[in-house]
Image: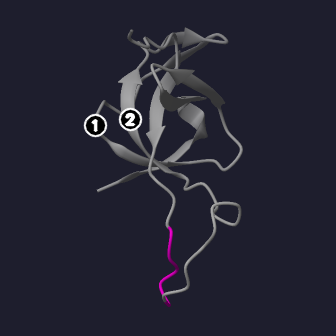
Amino acid sequence: MKLIPLADRVVLKQSTPEEKTKSGIILTSTSQEKPQQAEVIAVGPGGVVDGKEVVMNVKPGDMVIFSKYAGNEVKLDDEEYIIVKQSDILAIVE
């Protein structure tokens, strides 16, 4: 199956959470915070959303940072994805 986002939506695949802090402390799965960094999997066509022209600035393969509580989590073929609006993406990581 394939996810195809509509309008200004973007499908993201989150990075795996860090299991160890920079100082070497191992974190349990309950104390691990989900990362806000993800890879762009699919991008909607943009177009007119709420009367405004939306141009998509991200493309599949980009690494991005997104808002902490943004989007909807979906599970497809045992993979977890997050679908967010492009406005919920804060930056592209290069």
Label 1 SS: loop
**Helix, strand or loop for disc 2:** strand
Tag shown at residue 40: 2
71 to the left or right of 82? right
Coloring basis for residues: one colour
Give the CA distance from mark 2 to mark 1.
Answer: 5 Å
Q: Tell me: residue 3, above or below residue 71.
A: above
Residue 16, x across and y down, in percent: 46, 53
Mark 2 or 1 closer to N-term?
2
Residue 64, horizontal then vertical, whole percent: 43, 47
Amino acid type at mark 2: Val
How packed mark 1 is, by other alpha carbons closer than 10 Å (few <14, some 14-19, many 20 or more), is few
Q: Main secondary structure of the magenta part?
A: loop
Q: Which disc, if any, is residue 61? A: 1
Q: What span is in magenta?
A: 19-23
Pick the quarter of the image with the C terminus: bottom left
